[in-house]
Amino acid sequence: MHFTYEHHERLGSTLQPAMSGGGGVKKRGSGGSAGPEEEKMLAGAGAGGAAGAGAQENGCALAAAPAEGGGGGGVALKRNITLANGVAIIVGTIIGSGIFVTPTGVLREAGSPGLALLVWAACGVFSIVGALCYAELGTTISKSGGDYAYVLEVYGALPAFLKLWVELLIIRPSSQYIVAFVFATYLLKPLFPTCLVPDAAAKLVACLCVRE
C-alpha cells in the first residue's frame, strides 16, 4: 500500500490527541501486528487517497467508480458534449463549401428558379433522412469513433480498418482541398471581375492554404 506525505500528516494528527492524553500509545514489538484501531485508520487513509487520486487523472475529470456489488465497470470519462454542442457539430458537418459553388450549376441546368427550388427541397429531404440515420446510430451505438465505431460494430474489424484508411488517405484530404479551392476562388474573384478565375491561380492559392 502506498502512502503520500499528506496521508502521513493526517495519520499523525489523528494519533496526536491519543498520545497527549493519559497513558500514551503502547509500542508494539518488531514482530507484533498492528492493532484493530490502527488498521482501521490506515485503511481509511488509503481509501481516501485512492478516492482523491481517482477524481482526476492527467487533467481529465473522471466519473466515480460504482461501489462493489452495484454493477457497472470501472472509472470512465464524463460526457461533456451538450445539446448545443451536438447541434453545432452536426450543422458544421452538413453545411460545407458546396453551397457556394453548386447553386449556379443547379439554376443553369434546371432552367427556371421554381424547378431549382424543387431540386433543393428534394435534396434537403435526403439530407434530413441522412441526419436522422446518424442520430439513430449515435443513440444505438454509444461509442466514440464516429463512422469507424459504427462500421466496426456492424461489419467487423476488416471493413472498419479499410474505412478508416480510406477516410484518412482519400476522403478527408479531398474535402479539405475542395474547401481550400473554393476559398481561393472567392479570394481571387475581385482580381478578375469580368472573367473566370484561372484554375492555376486558384489551385496555387488553395495549395498554400492547405500547406498553412
Image (cartoon, rainbow, N blue to C red):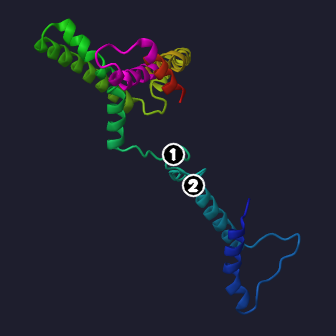
* Residue at horizontal 43 percent and vertical 46 percent from the top: 80
Asked if residue 71 shows in the view, the reply is yes
Label 2 or label 1, whichever comes before in sequence order: 2
| Element on which disc 1 rests | loop
Q: From the viewer's side, name the closer residue of 63 and 86.
A: 86
Q: Position of residue 196 (x, y in %)?
A: 33, 13
Q: Position of residue 10 (x, y in %)?
A: 67, 74
The local secondary structure at tag 2 comes to: strand
> Is residue 39 visible from the viewing direction of this image?
no
Does the magenta segment cover residue 212? Answer: no
What amino acid type should be assigned to the residue bearing mark 1?
Leu
Picture quadrant where residue 184 is located = top left
x, y (%) of residue 155? 48, 16
Q: What residue appears at the point 73 percent right and 60 percent down from the top-left corner?
A: 2
Pick whichever, 38 or 138, lies toward us. Answer: 138
- Residue type of the residue flagged with mark 2: Gln
Give the residue at mark 1: 77
At a point 66% along the width and 79% down the height, the residue shown is: 14
In the image, residue 196 above or below residue 89: above
What quarter of the picture does the N terminus occupy? bottom right
**In this picture, is 104 found above or below 60?**
above
Asked if residue 191 is among those painted magenta in the image, a careful observer would answer yes
